[in-house]
Amino acid sequence: MNAMNEKTALPDEVPVLIAGAGPVGMVLAILLARQGVRSLVLEKRERINVLPRARGINVRSVEIMTQLDLGEELRADALPALWSRSFVYTERMAGELVGIMPGNMAPGSSAAFSPCEYRIAAQDKLDPMLYRKALAQGCDIRLRHEVTAFRDEGSDVVATVATEGGGTREVRAQWLVAADGGASRLREAADIGHAHHATYRSFVATHFHADLSRFTKGREGALIWTLAPGVVGLFHPLDGKTAWAGQIQYDPTREQPHTWSDADVVRRLQAMIGAPEGEAPEIDLHKHYTFTLTASVAERFRQGRLLLAGDAAHCTLPHGGWGLNTGIQSAHNLAWKLAAVLGGKAPVALLDTYDAERREAARRNCEFAEVNAGHTEKLMRALRESSGPEERRRIVEGSRQYGNWSGLDLGIHYDGSAGRGAFVSDNIAAPAVENPVIDYVPHAKPGWRAPHFWGRTAQERIRVSSVMLFDGGFTLLAGPQGQAWVEAVGALDAAGALPAIKPWRVAPDGDLVPEAVDFCALYGIGADGAVLVRPDGHVAWRVAGGVPDAKLVLHEMLARTLCHDQA
């Protein structure tokens, strides 16, 4: 799979240079292209990834993918619904069942809060999908090209590029984005350390085909753990049929899996399956490699003209599948801010809010995954120490948030704890919940994801989720008596100094007619109030009621959101 531009010369200059064509780099390039910003994506590999790697795409990330017109393709490539309802814990796949934990990944689980659903679709499908979309969007992606060094010259950055023929070139960019993975060469070159870093268990990752249906019938799960001593690991169904990924846990102080042959790996997988004698399935092994679980958050995501994204900025443990999602959402946060700065609508200070907001989110997601890893450790200890099945089942039930995470997913937010964000906070507290990971109560406090509701456009009578309105530009939602806010948007747009805003008066006789929802109650405003939503779907500002000069207030709040007071 080759980029269409590989035979043309590299450009001398580009607004944004992205190092790495993983899913984060490609999502960023697509989002920038949709806002009219040209980028160049350089990838050292010879081809786009075709290994399963990450699989879980949470609801918020599916919303973003749907805005990119990839929602239906993602659905078609996802694991069948039967397999997405639960996590399954066994001693061995074919042996004793320890417990089943229902999750909120099943169809319909998020219907009250989003137009989208959780998808389990591995990177061997996702990455080529994003690559095709990026090329269709006109993105310039070069394989067999690597950014090996750079120098920040203040007003721009000059990158040294190793080309496929063994030579080097220099490319000048206004911004350089390091999306080059957890061992980021560019992060190291910038001498950016980690504010948080920890290593955990080691595994051998495998990708294989096998018919395991006689062992999984009645215990289908998005993850199937094997917890018995000596065979600890997990199986990931990729298609609900014969495609699998497996992870074999090993002890690096006693074992040397780099010496294992394919036959050794197959024997370990067979031991994890634990089939009765004479019933061992045939395993067609395609790939295996070692990895150690790591959780890390860089101490900063911006240094001068360099911006870190994806694993270069943050790595989370796979327990809960938050690594890929954190990266996609970081790209979503960064794209509109880069576009605003490059378009002269915001000062460079706006990019400091990318650093603050996404470091806050990355640390929160890392902590969640680390708690989930602890649940798995408890389960393994229970098998060794428990008095019987009842105790094991109780521990499985106690791991409920591993697989139930609507609060973390749809309650994604920024509160300013890592630095100033691109929003104007208010003094209304977010609703209290028993468990912020599991429980989600929709609301529109600034910094939070703006909640979903269904409505119909007055002119076209098209049914649309509010989430799909927040795509690429600022959006203003005004109450039934908020016409003054709509008129203020028109006056500001005529001035042209700040980014354009799309206004909607939400009312039975408005531009957007809500369906079966009290919009004002949901968004926490009065009938003459309004909410400003950012291009990434987070609330920038809200006002409960009318004001004497709506244009003046709206101008001030948008300017503060864009950090003009820091210029």
Image (cartoon, helix red, strand yellow):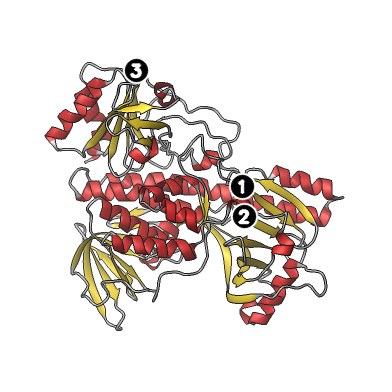
User: In this rendering, would 217 be left or right of 103?
Assistant: right
* Above or below, 43 relative to 103: below
Mark 2 lies on a secondary structure that is loop
Mark 3 lies on a secondary structure that is loop
User: In this rendering, would 90 be left or right of 354?
Assistant: right
Q: Residues within 10 Å of mark 3 (few under 14, many from 20)?
A: some
Q: Which is more N-terminal, label 2 or label 1?
A: 2
Q: Amino acid at mark 2?
A: Ala
Q: Which mark is residue 403?
A: 1
Separation of marks 2 and 3 at Cα, in angstroms: 44 Å
Q: Which of the two residues, 274 or 551, is positioned nearer the viewer here?
A: 274
* Above or below, 110 relative to 212: above
Q: Amino acid at mark 1?
A: Gly
**Quarter occupied by residue 146:** bottom left
Q: Residues within 10 Å of mark 1 (few under 14, many from 20)?
A: many
Q: Residues within 10 Å of mark 2 (few under 14, many from 20)?
A: many
In which quadrant will I find the N terminus?
bottom left
Work out whether residue 173 can be spotted.
yes
In which quadrant will I find the C terminus?
top left
Q: Which residue is mark 2?
A: 222
User: In this rendering, would 419 be left or right of 97?
Assistant: left
Q: Which is more N-terminal, label 3 or label 1?
A: 1
Please report the residue visible at 21 percent of the width from the left and 38 percent of the height from the top.
500
* Above or below, 97 relative to 346: below
Q: Which residue is mark 3?
A: 527
